[in-house]
Amino acid sequence: MIFGFYLFNRDGICLYHEEWKRSRTVSSREDNHKLLFGLLFMMKAFVSKLSPKDGCEFHSFKTAAFKLHYFDTPSGLKFVLTTDDKTPNLRDCLKHIYSSIYVELVAKSPSQEIGKQIEGSHFSQSLNKYVQSLSYFQS
Amino acid sequence: MSCYTLFIINKAGGLIYKRDFSADAPKLSVNDQLRLVSTFHSMHAIAGRLSPVDPASGIDHIETNTFQLFCYQSLTGLKFLITSPAHTSGSLEHLLFKTYQLYSDFVLKNPFYELDMPIHCSQFDTNLDKLILGK
């Protein structure tokens, strides 16, 4: 079951956020974004310090309630999917979202300003279509 | 069962025990160890707050391309962390639970041990060796 999708840029701005399931209320959306970005930033630093070899990339973490899948690009874009804890690694899905949906519809779009939230329904529609077609998504 | 390092964190987030079980484990200075472990303690708490569904709980597994980390938190707030190579099959949570049993047998029952202080109990060390390296 897929709970949500987040997209952050290198400055911590949440460019896109979609929720398909959330049963626990949060204080505010902005607080949630800041907390999540802060956690991802800390996690990257933590993991690279603890790694036995160089070039460590953080893939995912799991709690008893949910699993968070992560993919980042060298330009600092961070793609995040939250799912239930039984889902296997969705890093390939995140790579697909980056290469086939983000690059095609946002990076190549002349009307999309860099560093601002993603506007327009193209990205949203494509993303929803792709995520809902995954076998792990049960609404 | 190959592992890199075991950490035990008290309920305040301070490191009370650290042990390397492999020559490949990263060499960290004492300051770095303390800092990393308190970082994990806060991340564990934040992940619980970010949970989209109930019941909220902290991180129990981190996966990267070079290593994996498993965490077991006892009801008293003590955290046991273990790092292992990237493609370890299965969860090491049972190992952490056995470590918790060893802790309660050889550390808590030691009359000279003060709670939440660094662990220096030789019986705990020898039994831990038997558990992790002897397997």
Image (cartoon, rainbow, N blue to C red):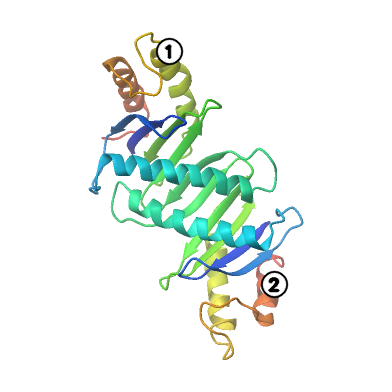
**Percent x, y of residue A13:** 38, 32
Q: Residue at x 45, y 16 (%)?
A: A103
Specify whether B17 is left or right of B11.
Answer: right
Q: Residues within 10 Å of mark 2 (few under 14, many from 20)?
A: few
Instruction: For mark 2, give the secondary structure.
Output: helix
Q: Nearer the viewer, residue A32 or B19?
A: A32
Q: Is residue B25 above or below residue A39?
A: below
Horizontal side of A83 relative to B82 (left or right) equals left
Dot 1 amino acid type? Glu
Q: Residues within 10 Å of mark 1 (few under 14, many from 20)?
A: few
Q: Residue at x 33, y 49 (%)?
A: B51
The quarter holding residue A67 reads top left
Residue A42: tell me if it is visible: yes
Above or below, comparing residue A117 to residue B108 in the picture = above
Disc 2 to disc 1, C-alpha distance: 56 Å
Name the mark on residue B130: 2
Chain letter of mark 2 equals B
Callout 2–callout 1 Cβ contact below 8 Å: no
Say what secondary structure mark 1 lies in.
helix
Between A32 and A18, which is closer to the camera in this rendering?
A32
Chain of the residue that carries numbered disc 1 in the rendered image: A
Q: Nearer the viewer, residue A101 or A31?
A: A31
Q: Which residue is mark 1?
A: A104
Q: Residue sitting at 74 percent across and 52 percent down?
A: B24
Image-quadrant location for residue B58? bottom left
Would you place residue A4 above or below residue B23 in this image?
above
The spot of residue B30 in percent (x, y) is 66, 63
Q: Is residue B87 visible?
A: no
Whole-percent x and y of residue B7?
Answer: 59, 64
